[in-house]
């Protein structure tokens, strides 16, 4: 039996040691004044859903899980349901198992702790629509078949609005300029409390800054293994939201909280490692990449059109995915290139080995981070396995090219609508087979459901429909 918690799933009765550990943890938490534990996961539409338990129930949850309907796998962002051959029925039950390794007391929600969950069936089988389990398996497969491990980080951009704004309107909570000193001063207490809360939760923040768009901020955090990275992306967003509420603020992680202009991205940083060596540094290929790293990047580029249905899953995602807004809407790569979908980052002199990675830009925070990371890795591995050649790098903004010039370079514009993205996803057999038929069908059904939900709405109405969902 594999004892690595990142590759072995929960089992009915608990894995050896789990119940003892949960019992000890629940006593410690109770002593710290923690009354309840949030069991968190993300559905296929990218909405965080929870069940919560009293702290004293943790050992029971570690042994037997907590029940939840499988219907949420085909929930839409507006809480209506679609269905597939397998999913969406009101019948059946799943067990949610908290990952004790990731359990953390919530600094901004005193009295609460938080843990991400894996979901298994009542018979103890893998639930094929559990996105966290999917990512664990992708990571474990890559280790077994290729001797690879990964480091990842997800940037978080969000917009801060006044909590007192009428209805669903967004009124920025700051008036200072992009990246401006003024903006940070305006939300000084909020930002300081946020940093303190993240530090208390052992989140190593690299930086926080006011971003480009109205009321927009960004935080970047250190890289971890992919499952921990996806978990932490949820935790960071929950913390940003909880601290905002203390200050009478309202936050949106929606890809386009306004119909026009720059949106909120969730850029992913990813690097592949073998035997402790970063494949993106110290190699003989371009910018210090190894041949494997180039092929991995080529795999990402080749699958990006289909990946978009996973990384940009909302109708509102396509209000963000526009050229010349640093969202990376072309299937191109370049060194530190901000208008290419894949930006090769080498890091500063002396830190190449630690810092070199690929940044994937056409990703937003409506996306389920477990599905995103699993699918990005599957795409990259497809390139690596076939030694796919990486085309020439691009500098500047591909938007300046005519269609013919872009075609001559093999550069494509990514889908301009969710409908187009679903078409690309349907044609991408590698992605669908990595997800497995149940999850792949769920992705298609949920995306089609979102498309139907906004039929006839104009851009303003689409932005408004999703503004406060994520
Ligand atoms: N807000 C941009 C986006 O939607 C990204 C800006 C940046 O590069 O930080 O992706
Ligand atoms: Mg940014």
Image (cartoon, helix red, strand yellow):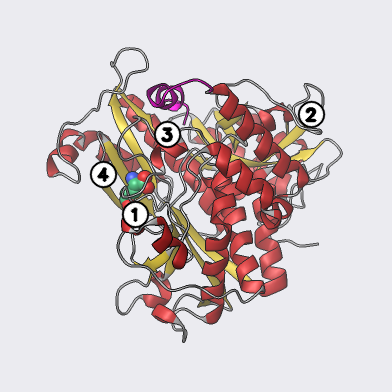
Q: Residues within 10 Å of mark 1 (few under 14, many from 20)?
A: some
Q: Is residue 433 above or below residue 34?
A: below
**Percent of width and height locating residue 235:** 48, 41
Quick one: SS at disc 2?
loop
Task: Say if the magenta span includes residue 465.
Answer: yes
Badge number at residue 399? 1
What is the quadrant of residue 463 in the picture?
Answer: top left
Q: Are marks 1 and 4 in contact (CB under 8 Å)?
A: no
In the displayed structure image, the side of residue 449 where residue 461 appears, left or right:
left
Asked whether residue 172 is drawn in magenta, I would say no
To which quarter of the image does residue 459 belong?
top left
Image location of residue 256, percent across then percent down: 39, 34
Please state which of the two labelled residues, at mark 4 or mark 2, is closer to the viewer.
4
Q: Which residue is mark 3?
A: 254
Q: Is mark 4 within 8 Å of ligand 2?
A: yes
Q: CA distance from mark 4 to mark 2?
A: 43 Å
Q: Which residue is mark 2?
A: 93
The region drawn magenta spans 455-470
The residue that mark 4 highlights is 211
């Amino acid at each position: 039996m594999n004892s690595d918690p990142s590759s072995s799933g929960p089992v009915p009765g608990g894995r050896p040691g789990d119940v003892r550990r949960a019992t000890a943890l629940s006593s410690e938490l109770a002593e710290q004044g923690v009354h309840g534990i949030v069991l968190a996961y993300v559905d296929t539409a990218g909405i965080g859903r929870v069940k919560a338990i009293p702290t004293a129930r943790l050992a029971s949850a570690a042994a037997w899980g907590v029940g939840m309907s499988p219907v949420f796998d085909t929930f839409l962002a507006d809480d209506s349901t679609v269905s597939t051959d397998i999913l969406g029925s009101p019948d059946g039950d799943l067990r949610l198992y908290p990952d004790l390794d990731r359990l953390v007391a919530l600094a901004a929600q005193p009295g609460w702790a938080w843990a991400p969950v894996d979901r298994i069936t009542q018979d103890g089988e893998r639930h094929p629509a559990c996105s966290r389990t999917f990512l664990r398996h992708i990571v474990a497969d890559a280790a077994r078949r290729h001797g690879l491990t990964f480091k990842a980080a997800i940037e978080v951009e969000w917009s801060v609005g006044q909590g007192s704004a009428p209805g669903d309107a967004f009124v920025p909570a700051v008036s200072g300029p992009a990246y401006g000193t003024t903006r940070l001063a305006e939300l000084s207490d909020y930002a300081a409390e946020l940093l303190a809360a993240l530090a208390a939760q052992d989140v190593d923040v690299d930086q926080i800054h006011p971003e480009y768009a109205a009321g927009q901020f960004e935080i970047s955090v250190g890289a971890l293994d992919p499952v921990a990275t996806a978990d932490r992306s949820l935790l960071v967003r929950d913390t940003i939201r909880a601290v905002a509420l203390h200050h009478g603020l309202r936050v949106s992680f929606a890809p386009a909280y306004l119909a026009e202009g720059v949106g909120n991205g969730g850029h992913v940083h990813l690097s592949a490692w073998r035997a402790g060596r970063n494949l993106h540094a110290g190699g003989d290929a371009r910018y210090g990449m190894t041949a494997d790293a180039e092929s991995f990047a080529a795999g990402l580029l080749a699958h990006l059109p289909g990946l978009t249905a996973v990384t940009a899953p909302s109708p509102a995602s396509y209000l963000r995915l526009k050229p010349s807004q640093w969202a990376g809407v072309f299937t191109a790569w370049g060194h530190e290139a901000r208008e290419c979908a894949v930006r090769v980052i080498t890091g500063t002199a002396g830190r190449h080995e630690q810092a070199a990675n690929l940044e994937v830009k056409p990703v937003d925070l409506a996306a389920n981070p477990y599905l995103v990371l699993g699918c990005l890795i599957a795409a990259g591995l497809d390139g690596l396995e076939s030694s796919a050649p990486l085309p020439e790098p691009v500098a500047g903004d591909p938007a300046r090219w005519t269609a013919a010039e872009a075609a001559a370079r093999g550069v494509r514009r990514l889908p301009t609508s969710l409908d187009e993205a679903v078409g690309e996803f349907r044609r991408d057999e590698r992605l669908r087979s990595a997800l497995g038929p149940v999850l792949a069908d769920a992705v298609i059904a949920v995306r089609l459901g979102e498309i139907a939900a906004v039929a006839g709405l104009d851009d303003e109405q689409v932005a408004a429909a999703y503004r406060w969902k994520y």
